Each structure stands twice: as C-alpha cells, then as structure tokens.
C-alpha cells in the first residue's frame, strides 16, 4: 500500500527529478566549494516545506517528521560534489563549468534524495518516525565531507538508528539495484615517500648514495607487504603510482619521490600495514645509508554494511521493486566516505543501476563520458523514500 503510493509519487515527480538532475549536472562544483549547489538544495527543501540547517559550510541537513516522530529515526545521505574532469558528452545538460563534471553521479544522488524528501513529506501521514536528510559536501577529497559533518554533529540530536546511501552503478543495467552484506568498499590511504642521499657522478657511485637504487628496493619491498604480511583471504592493494627522480644519464640524483595508494578491507590490518610500511622505510634507509621521509595520509575507512540492516534492506527492496531486480553488489577496492557513517551507526550503502547497454550508456564513473539512463532517477527517489519510511532494525 505504502509502496504503491511511493511508486506512484516517484513516477509523478519523475519529470521534475530529471529537470533537477540536469540542472545540477550542468552546474557542477568541486569538493567543498558547493555553494550554489547548497543554495539550490535549500531552495528545494523550502519549496517542499522541509525545515533544514547548514553544516560544514555547504552541507544541508533536513528533517521530516512522520507520525510518532520519536519511534524511529532513519538518515538518508547524498553527496553533492563534482570532479575536476572535462566533460566530453554532447548532451543538452552538459557541464557549463569548464574542467568540472559530475562524473561520479553525485548529481543523481542529490536528485534522488530531494525526490525522496518530497515523497516522504507528501506522505508524512502514512509512515512512522523521523527521516534525517543529509546532503554532504566533499566526498571526492580528503578528509571527506562525511567526517566534517559527523564532527559537527550530524549524527546527534536526533541520533539516527541507521543510515542509507546509494551510488550510481554504470555496470548495472537500469531497473536494478544491488546490495551486499559486510564490507563493500575498501579503506584508502595515500603515501608519499621522499628518498634523499648524496647525489653525484654516475661513474663514482661509491662517493654517493644511490637514491634510485634505494627507491627500487623500496618498491620491491613494499609490494611484498601485501604478498607476505597480509592475510590472503582479506583483500588489500598497494600500488606505487609515481616515481620521480633524476634527469640525465650520468648523474645520480640526490632525491627520488614515490607516491602511491594503500587499500584494505580490514581496519586492524590497515593500521598494522602502516606500521610495516614505516618499518621497511626505516630499515632500508638504514641499510643503504639514505634518508627516507614517509608521510601517510590516512583516508576513508572501509564501507561496512550492517548485516541485519542489509537483510532488512534486501527484502524491502524486493518488496518495492520485485526480487528479480535485486542483486548482490560485487566487492570493490574503491573508497567512499560513507565509511565514516557506517563506522558510527548501522549503515547500508547500495547501488542503483544506471547503465543502458543498448543505448551505449556504459561509461564508467570518473570518466569524461560518464552518463546515466535517467529512468534510474524515479527508482532511486522511490527506493530512498521507501527505506526512509520503512527500514528498521527492530524486528517486527
Ligand atoms: Ni561517488
């Protein structure tokens, strides 16, 4: 009954949703600079009659009360920032800001949450509890807008029992959604290594410290942390993605810089690995007579989907969309700052199918040709509203 009403409203608001998405898509803003986007969201919430406050400069938090507002409190989250990518799509709603693009679908996430807000507000006599709407900045850049919102109290007063977030998936055909229990995405930390030594003539290496050779040892040794120290049943990746040093054939450089990323699915292993990386750097520096400065920029934690909440969400999704439309999300070593919420309260991060292979809409996120099949919008709006209205951790 409620599902039917939500499906009906999602359809009724679909045209508006597409218009909103196209507006956001045409006006993307980089992480922590989402001022116009923030004002746009505030304007829409005001239009729908939903009270809201601003957090973390450009974040917006709205509250919708159903019947018995104290009985349950559910948070729904969308990220609102775009990426420094020049769009190559030739569409009427193409980015109007040179070099900035909604290439990760955050325009779609924002649209789906605005749509869900409008649906929940319209139907507030039909569901119980309170829904907290979280529009957060800066998902694409450290320290992650989620961490700032949490520090500013987004999960307090009232404290949600559970939180839902969705993400577009250009590998999943439109019409479908996918869920996964437990770990769904990895933690991501960046590391920066600066190898210094006495450079000099290439023909007299005994008068120098060969920073190139030190860097080579570091690369080999750090790779082995994954193969020799990590539990093979727990996915983890270390990639060195930049090596800079030297400029000619006959000079040993005084400095070589390395940069890379370290990802894990286990928070204990993650920090143990940081210690091993530090130890290797120290030992190699000592053994080879170089100086090594290491900086690890600690990024987002793993995204963990609460087991019971996952079960609830999976069966609710089946009820709303038909079980054949619900599938299991594959594991990813990508990262998401939703992990900060799911670290604090039960969370469920799910995927919204946005691909349409027949129409050639399959380009991945973070690419200049990323786009979606817009019929995903009504599904996303409806699913978020449905979770907001129905999901609960209390067994009924
Ligand atoms: Ni994203």
Image (spheres, rainbow, N blue to C red):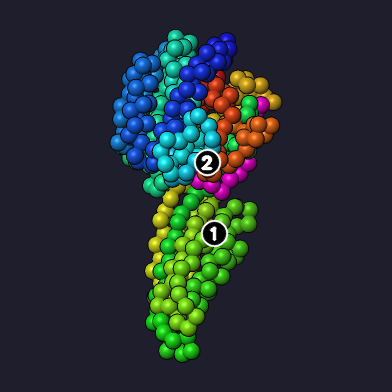
Mostly what secondary structure, the magenta segment? loop
Q: Quick one: label 2, few (<14), some, or many (20+) residues within 10 Å?
A: few
Mark drawn on residue 88 = 2
The residues bearing labels 2 and 1 have C-alpha atoms spaced at a distance of 31 Å
Locate residue 49, reporting x and y percent. 35, 15
Quadrant where the image shows the N terminus: top right
Q: Residue at x 50, y 29 (%)?
A: 92
Dot 2 or dot 1: first in sequence order is 2
Q: Residue at x 41, y 38 (%)?
A: 97
Q: In terms of image quadrants, where is residue 151?
A: top left
**Secondary structure state at the residue bearing disc 2:** loop
Tell me: residue 7, above or below residue 144. above
The magenta segment is 325-336
Quadrant where the image shows the C terminus: top right
Q: Residue at x 43, y 78 (%)?
A: 253
Q: Residue at x 51, y 71 (%)?
A: 218
Q: Residue 391 or 77: which is nearer the viewer?
A: 77
Q: Residue 336 or 278: which is nearer the viewer?
A: 336
Left/right of residue 258 with respect to residue 310 in the rendered view: left
Mark drawn on residue 238 = 1
Q: In terms of image quadrants, where is residue 179?
A: top right
Q: Quick one: label 1, few (<14), some, or many (20+) residues within 10 Å?
A: some
């Amino acid at each position: 009954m409620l599902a039917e009403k939500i499906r009906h409203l999602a359809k009724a608001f679909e045209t508006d949703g597409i218009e909103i998405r196209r507006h956001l898509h045409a006006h993307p803003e980089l992480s922590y600079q989402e001022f116009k986007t923030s004002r746009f969201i505030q304007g829409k919430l005001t239009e729908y009659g939903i009270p809201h406050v601003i957090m973390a400069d450009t974040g917006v938090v709205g509250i919708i009360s159903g019947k018995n507002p104290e009985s349950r409190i559910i948070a729904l989250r969308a990220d609102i920032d775009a990426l420094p990518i020049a769009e190559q799509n030739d569409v009427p709603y193409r980015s109007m800001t040179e070099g900035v693009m909604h290439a990760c679908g955050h325009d779609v996430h924002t649209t789906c949450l605005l749509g869900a807000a409008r649906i929940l507000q319209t139907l507030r006599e039909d569901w119980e509890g309170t829904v907290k709407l979280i529009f957060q900045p800066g998902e694409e850049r450290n320290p992650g807008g989620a961490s700032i919102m949490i520090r500013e109290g987004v999960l307090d007063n009232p404290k949600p029992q559970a939180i839902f977030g969705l993400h577009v998936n250009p590998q999943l055909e439109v019409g479908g959604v996918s869920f996964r229990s437990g770990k769904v995405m990895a933690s991501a930390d960046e590391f920066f290594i600066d190898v210094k030594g006495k450079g000099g003539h290439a023909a007299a290496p005994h008068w120098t410290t060969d920073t190139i050779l030190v860097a080579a040892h570091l690369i080999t040794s750090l790779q082995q942390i994954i193969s020799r120290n990590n539990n093979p049943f727990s996915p983890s990746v270390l990639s060195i993605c930049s090596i800079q040093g030297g400029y000619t054939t006959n000079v040993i450089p005084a400095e070589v810089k390395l940069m890379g990323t370290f990802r894990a699915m286990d928070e204990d292993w993650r920090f143990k690995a940081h210690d091993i990386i530090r130890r290797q750097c120290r030992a190699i520096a000592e053994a080879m007579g170089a100086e090594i400065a290491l900086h690890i920029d600690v990024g987002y934690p793993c995204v963990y989907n609460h087991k019971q909440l996952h079960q609830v969400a999976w069966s609710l999704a089946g009820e709303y969309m038909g079980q054949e439309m619900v599938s299991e999300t594959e594991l990813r070593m990508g990262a998401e700052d939703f992990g900060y919420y799911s670290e604090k309260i039960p969370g469920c991060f799910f995927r919204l199918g946005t691909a349409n292979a027949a129409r050639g809409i399959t380009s991945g996120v973070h690419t200049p040709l990323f786009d979606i099949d817009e019929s995903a919008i009504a599904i996303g709006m409806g699913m978020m509203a449905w979770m907001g209205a129905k999901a609960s951790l209390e067994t009924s």
